């Protein structure tokens, strides 16, 4: 039972950022998205990934590694959108 809970937690935290990425790509608007939140979240999931690697624990490595990639994508979108730079 605890493995099922762990897998579900990994799935939900991994896909949590997808709606924000899709919305940002569709609307091209990210003015109200905080880059600092994504920086902090990115550091957190990156550290979890490193921790999983150190423990050789794939249920920690895989979802957090994917989260690292997805949150990096969102941070890139936030930092590179013209609207964020003030060039509407």
Image (cartoon, rainbow, N blue to C red):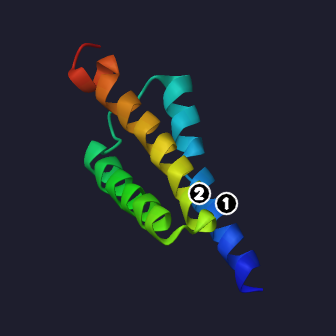
- What residue lies at 70% left-to-right and 69% top-to-bottom? 7
Of the 4 image quadrants, the one containing the N terminus is bottom right
Q: Return the disc, 2 or 1, that comes first in the chain's sequence.
A: 1
Looking at the picture, tell me which residue is in the foreground, 87 or 5: 5
Q: Residues within 10 Å of mark 2 (few under 14, many from 20)?
A: many
- What residue lies at 41% left-to-right and 39% top-to-bottom? 72
Looking at the picture, tell me which residue is in the foreground, 86 or 53: 53
Q: Secondary structure at mark 1?
A: helix
Where is residue 74, by image quadrant?
top left
Where is residue 14, by image quadrant?
bottom right
> Which residue is identified by label 1?
11
Q: Is residue 30 visible?
A: no
Q: Which mark is residue 26?
A: none
Where is residue 61, by image quadrant?
bottom right
Q: Secondary structure at mark 2?
A: helix
- What residue lies at 70% left-to-right and 78% top-to-bottom? 5
Looking at the picture, tell me which residue is in the foreground, 60 or 42: 60
Q: Nearer the viewer, mark 2 or mark 1?
A: 2
Q: Is residue 45 left or right of residue 12?
A: left
Q: Are marks 2 and 1 in contact (CB under 8 Å)?
A: yes
Q: Is residue 27 above or below residue 2?
A: above
Q: Position of residue 2 (x, y in %)?
A: 71, 85
> Which residue is identified by label 2?
63
């Amino acid at each position: 039972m605890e493995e099922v809970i762990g897998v579900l937690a990994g799935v939900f935290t991994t896909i949590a950022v997808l709606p924000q990425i899709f919305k940002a790509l569709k609307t091209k608007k990210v003015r109200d998205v905080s880059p600092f939140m994504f920086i902090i979240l990115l550091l957190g999931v990156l550290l979890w990934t490193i921790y999983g690697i150190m423990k050789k624990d794939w249920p920690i490595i895989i979802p957090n590694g994917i989260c690292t990639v997805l949150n990096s994508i969102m941070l890139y979108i936030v930092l590179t959108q013209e609207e964020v730079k003030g060039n509407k």
